[in-house]
Amino acid sequence: MTVDKEQVEKMIYSENKQSVIDGMLGMTFSSEEDEIPWISEKLTELSKHKDLDIASLSLTCFGHLARMHENIGDCDKVVALLRSKQGNPDFQGFAEDALDEISFFIFKKRP
């Protein structure tokens, strides 16, 4: 299945929290390999969202991409983003879980 980028953008840029969450999960779980760079950029944007649930879910979605595709887009950029979130108690657990998934599925190392 491929991602309808126009529809996803309507959803993730919506003011409706559930729409943003549904759009984020939809693009993550419907992703094809060639869409990952675009999805990674959108997740990076959403990691800065004012709503903590949305921002933290974006971090979790990087872990899903790693598990499903063994690809998260620009790995250095994503890992740097996740490491920058580790110092924030609101995001620490989400960032660490995503980094563990990336370590295991992309770098093939157990945490």
Image (cartoon, grey):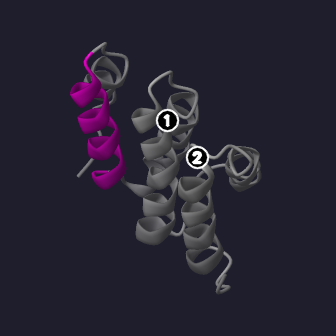
Label 2 with label 1: CB-CB less than 8 Å: yes
Question: Residue 11: which quarter of the image?
Answer: top left
Tell me the amino acid under the disc marked 2. Answer: Phe
Label 1 crowd (10 A; few <14 / some 14-19 / many >=20): many
Is residue 42 depicted above or below 15 in this figure?
Answer: below
Q: Residue at x 31, y 28 (%)?
A: 20
Q: On the picture, is 70 further left or further right than 80? A: left
Image x and y of residue 73, in percent: 60, 51
**What residue is at 30 percent from the left and 54 percent from the top?**
29
Q: Please report the bounds of the magenta region as a residue range.
A: 16-30
Residue 27 image-quadrant placement: top left
Label 1, on which residue?
55
- Image coordinates of residue 67 in percent, x first then y, are 45, 70
What amino acid is found at the position of numbered circle 1 in the picture?
A: Ala
The location of residue 96, given as percent across then percent down, is 62, 62
Q: Is residue 25 above or below residue 62?
A: above
Spatial separation of the CA atoms under disc 2 and disc 1: 8 Å
Residue occupied by mark 2: 91
Q: Single out the residue that lies furthest toward the front.
A: 89
